[in-house]
Image (tube, coloured by chain):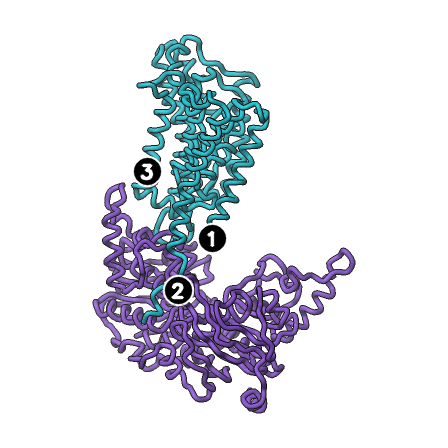
């Protein structure tokens, strides 16, 4: 970080982009009201808030993806009105979306110049495009070649390519929407480096993130939104993570994580011996006991999700032996596991967890359909009853029971998904990224739920890339690297440093040593 | 925390939109009927209307089966050829059984048709789900295979039904019960059974789940392959039912029997409001779609304004218009 640039940004610089009384309403529902904000060149300005606080709406207004219902924007002191994102980009404001929006089968250069290809006469000028792509890639520190095919690259690289595309033309304001949501810690560091570079080049960076530690590390100023209202803007140096969280939530945070339960010595509920997934890419043995939360840590791509999907028979796998609740599982499948008392909550809520275009009741009962409707006919009344109970028990906030699953917020979708797998009355629950992309209020509810589950003598396995979550929840942590468990941590040993060290160190030397 | 309650403006509006989508095929049908009445007074005669409805029965029955396939995320291009193939096998087995069974050969032949149709569907389904090949490609292949089989079996000509059976079999197409032709009754039965299966049973729920998202269904323990294969079998069974009603109409199977029916069937399903990408099935809509196609053809024949050679062009235009209308109502 450059202190001189900081001082400059805070005192003398005029805002490059200014929002004055910005508001947005859809019909009678106001999602953002009266936001006044200025963004200065050479600053990293973080926008934080819970899901539904209005962050995305604000970003869309600033970048021309949506038009305000009240208020206006100014650039360099002149009033502007972006009709669409193309106009905003022409003016130097660009939004980098959270999701990867690249054509997977095209090269990096083809993606960067998609829709604005350089030509010589009638021909596409690949050489010029590759040259300029290489320049931009160097600028964002991406270790890629212009002719690489995007689908061959890891997610983090693709994220950098997206940023590179946004920087192809000179920009005054770059808006990054949750740029690190999909990245592992190592990759986050690289991205932070890019943001630092942009700042030193005098670009204003608007940074939206759920990860408060990044905000603390990176931001010059922080603006907090809550329920569509602007709570205020502070110099980042005046806030610590806890204060940020409290401003977002609007109340003092009680303990986010429930107290730990200590190690269990009861007979294990789940015993997995010599499970091999994807033809040996992932190999592991492990046990889970009643009354414990087992955390599985590791970098993205370490094979954690693959391990569990293999265990559930969702990927090619074979095992020495698998026992659930004393039942030996010969051929693993979601159905067999469910009957034995084990369920898996996917990390991919939208793609693999819920039918977004279906209503809530069919979603809730899809997995436990045989117990909700024992005959061949559907028991519609029973489904509605089950939904009422689930909404009550899991505190799913819905205005109507007839909504479609896709109309719920991320947190409520996660609770619905939880309710769905719990309908089968399992004794072991495996949750992959239990709180990805959901806000703090819902997070703490899910943590409480996990605690209640294991207090009741069941067992829970949590896969998480969020280190505080892993450390805060788990009684025991297994760390995976390169498809093998490389460390087991218990009690006081469970710290972020130890997990990171095990997940990242000596990757090249040993290739990992299986434990357990 | 009120922030977690969902603040989306869309739901009420969208729900209304879906209802429009459900009603659209019936409104379109009503409009076309009114137009027909205005163009030619003979159109509304009981005789003409019964004729039109009876003729639409084949496409309607097959379209009910296609609704299952499409709702489950599949597609079956082979129904027209399969229809010809099943018809050919049925007639040949009826003829072969005449000496032994007399008129009972009709019933036995119908049984053979149902079995053969279901097996054809099973073949499609197994190749799609076990072989993990796009249903478009698989059924494009079997479409060619079934068509070649009927051409081979008929030696390029026709396979006529035995003269002795004609009189007994004739009423299945031309007869009626309380004034309602048998093919129409048959369609109503197929609709009733199909609706029960799709909307009231767990199987139906799993069909829409599999079509809505393969992954979500798999991760929820649904046997997606079995569900899809069964949908193809239902399709084959419906084709056989249509074949049973169809044979007495012309009394023979030829290499052109059922030609291009797959297009009419898919058109009927799509303009009936079932999405090609799967996840939703509208059985009554598909039947309305089949009626729309037949009524339009009838109106064009009765009016002198447009040549009847352009019937297929108008039907083709309708599927495009229906899709545009669908996009328009959804975009709002």
Disc number for residue B197? 3
Disc 3 is attached to a residue of which chain?
A: B
Q: Residues within 10 Å of mark 2 (few under 14, many from 20)?
A: few
User: Which mark's residue is nearer the viewer, 3 or 2?
Assistant: 2
Q: Secondary structure at mark 3?
A: helix
Is residue A513 visible in the rendered image? The answer is: no
**What is the CA distance from the residue labelled 3 to the residue labelled 1?**
32 Å
Say which residue label 1 marks. B332
Q: Which mark is residue A420?
A: none
On the same chain: label 3 and label 1? yes
Residue at 34% across / 19% down in the picture?
B179
From the image, tell me which residue sits under label 2. Answer: A29
Q: Nearer the viewer, mark 3 or mark 1?
A: 1
Closer to the camera in the image, B6 or B74? B6
- Between B68 and B286, the residue placed more toward the observer is B286
Measure the C-alpha gap from mark 3 to mark 2.
41 Å
Q: Residues within 10 Å of mark 3 (few under 14, many from 20)?
A: some
Q: Position of residue B243 (x, y in %)?
A: 43, 24
Q: Who comes first in sequence, dot 3 or dot 1?
A: 3
Subunit of label 1: B
What is the C-alpha distance between the residues marked 1 and 2? 17 Å
Give the chain letter for purple. Answer: A
Looking at the picture, how far across and down is residue A427, in whole percent? 25, 61
């Amino acid at each position: 970080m450059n202190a001189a640039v900081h001082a400059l940004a805070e005192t003398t610089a005029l805002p490059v982009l200014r929002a004055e009384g910005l508001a947005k309403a859809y019909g009678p529902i106001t999602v953002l009201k009266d936001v006044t904000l200025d963004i200065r060149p050479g600053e990293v300005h973080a926008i934080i808030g819970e899901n539904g606080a209005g962050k995305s709406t604000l970003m869309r207004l600033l970048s021309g993806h949506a038009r305000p219902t009240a208020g206006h924007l100014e650039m360099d002191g002149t009033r502007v009105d972006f009709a669409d994102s193309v106009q905003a980009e022409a003016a130097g404001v660009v939004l980098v979306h959270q999701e990867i929006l690249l054509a997977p089968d095209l090269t990096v250069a083809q993606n960067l110049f998609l829709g604005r290809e350089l030509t010589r006469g009638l021909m596409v000028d690949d050489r010029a495009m590759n040259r300029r792509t290489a320049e931009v890639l160097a600028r964002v520190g991406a270790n890629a070649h212009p002719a690489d095919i995007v689908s061959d690259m890891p997610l983090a690289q693709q994220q950098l390519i997206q940023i590179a595309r946004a920087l192809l033309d000179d920009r005054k304001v770059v808006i990054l929407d949750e740029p690190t949501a999909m990245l592992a810690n190592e990759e986050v560091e690289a991205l932070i480096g890019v943001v630092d570079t942009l700042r030193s080049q005098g670009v204003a960076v608007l940074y939206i993130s759920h990860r408060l530690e990044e905000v603390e590390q990176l931001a010059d100023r922080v603006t907090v939104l809550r329920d569509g209202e602007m709570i205020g803007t502070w110099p980042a140096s005046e806030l610590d993570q806890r204060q940020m969280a409290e401003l977002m939530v609007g109340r003092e945070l009680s303990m986010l994580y429930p107290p730990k339960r200590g190690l269990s010595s009861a007979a294990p509920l789940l015993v997995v011996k010599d499970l091999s997934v994807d033809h040996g890419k992932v190999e592991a043995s492990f046990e889970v006991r009643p009354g414990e939360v087992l955390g599985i840590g590791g970098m993205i791509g370490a094979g954690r999700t693959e391990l569990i999907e293999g265990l559930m028979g969702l990927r090619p796998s074979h095992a020495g032996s698998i026992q659930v609740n004393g039942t030996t599982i010969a051929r693993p499948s979601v159905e067999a596991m469910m009957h034995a008392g084990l369920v898996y909550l996917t990390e991919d809520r939208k793609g693999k967890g819920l039918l977004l275009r279906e209503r809530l009741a069919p979603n809730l009962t899809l997995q436990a359909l045989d117990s909700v409707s024992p005959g061949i006919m559907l028991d519609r009344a029973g489904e509605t009853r089950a939904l009422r109970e689930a909404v009550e028990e899991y505190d799913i906030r819905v205005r109507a029971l007839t909504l479609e699953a896709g109309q719920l917020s991320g947190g409520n979708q996660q609770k619905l998904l939880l309710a769905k797998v719990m309908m089968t009355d399992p004794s072991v629950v495996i949750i992959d990224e239990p709180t990805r992309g959901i806000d703090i209020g819902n997070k703490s509810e899910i943590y409480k739920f996990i605690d209640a589950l294991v207090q009741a003598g069941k067992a829970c396995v949590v896969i998480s890339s969020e280190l505080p979550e892993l450390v805060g929840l788990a009684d025991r942590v297994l760390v995976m690297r390169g498809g093998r468990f490389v460390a087991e941590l218990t009690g006081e040993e469970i710290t972020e440093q130890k997990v990171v060290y095990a997940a990242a160190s000596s990757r090249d030397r040993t290739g990992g040593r299986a434990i357990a | 925390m009120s922030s977690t309650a969902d603040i989306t403006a869309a739901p009420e509006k969208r729900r209304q939109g879906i209802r429009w989508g459900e009603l659209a095929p019936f409104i379109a049908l009503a409009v076309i009927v009114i137009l027909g009445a205005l163009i030619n007074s003979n159109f509304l005669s009981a005789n003409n209307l019964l004729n039109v409805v009876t003729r639409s029965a084949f496409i309607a029955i097959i379209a009910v089966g296609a609704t299952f396939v499409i709702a489950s995320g599949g597609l079956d291009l082979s129904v027209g050829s399969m229809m010809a193939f099943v018809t050919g096998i049925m007639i040949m087995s009826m003829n072969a059984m005449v000496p032994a069974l007399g008129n009972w050969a009709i019933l036995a032949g119908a049984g053979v048709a149902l079995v053969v149709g279901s097996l054809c569907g099973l073949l499609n389904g197994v190749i799609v789900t076990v072989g993990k090949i796009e249903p478009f490609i698989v059924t494009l292949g079997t479409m060619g295979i079934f068509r070649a089989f009927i051409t081979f079996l008929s030696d390029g000509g026709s396979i006529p039904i035995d003269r002795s059976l004609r009189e007994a079999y004739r009423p299945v197409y031309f007869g009626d019960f309380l004034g309602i032709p048998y093919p129409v009754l048959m369609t109503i039965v197929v609709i009733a059974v199909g609706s029960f299966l799709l909307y009231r049973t767990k199987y139906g729920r799993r069909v829409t789940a599999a079509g809505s998202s393969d992954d979500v269904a798999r991760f929820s323990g649904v046997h997606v392959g079995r569900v899809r294969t069964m949908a193809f079998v239902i399709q084959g069974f419906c084709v056989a039912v249509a074949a049973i009603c169809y044979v007495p109409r012309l009394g023979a199977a030829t290499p052109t029997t059922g030609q291009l029916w797959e297009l009419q069937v898919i058109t009927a399903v799509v303009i009936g409001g079932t999405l090609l990408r799967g996840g939703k099935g509208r059985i009554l809509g598909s039947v309305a779609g089949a009626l729309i196609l037949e009524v339009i053809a009838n109106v064009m024949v009765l009016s002198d304004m447009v040549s009847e050679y352009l019937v297929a062009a108008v039907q083709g235009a309708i599927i495009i218009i229906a899709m545009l209308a669908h996009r328009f109502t959804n975009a709002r």
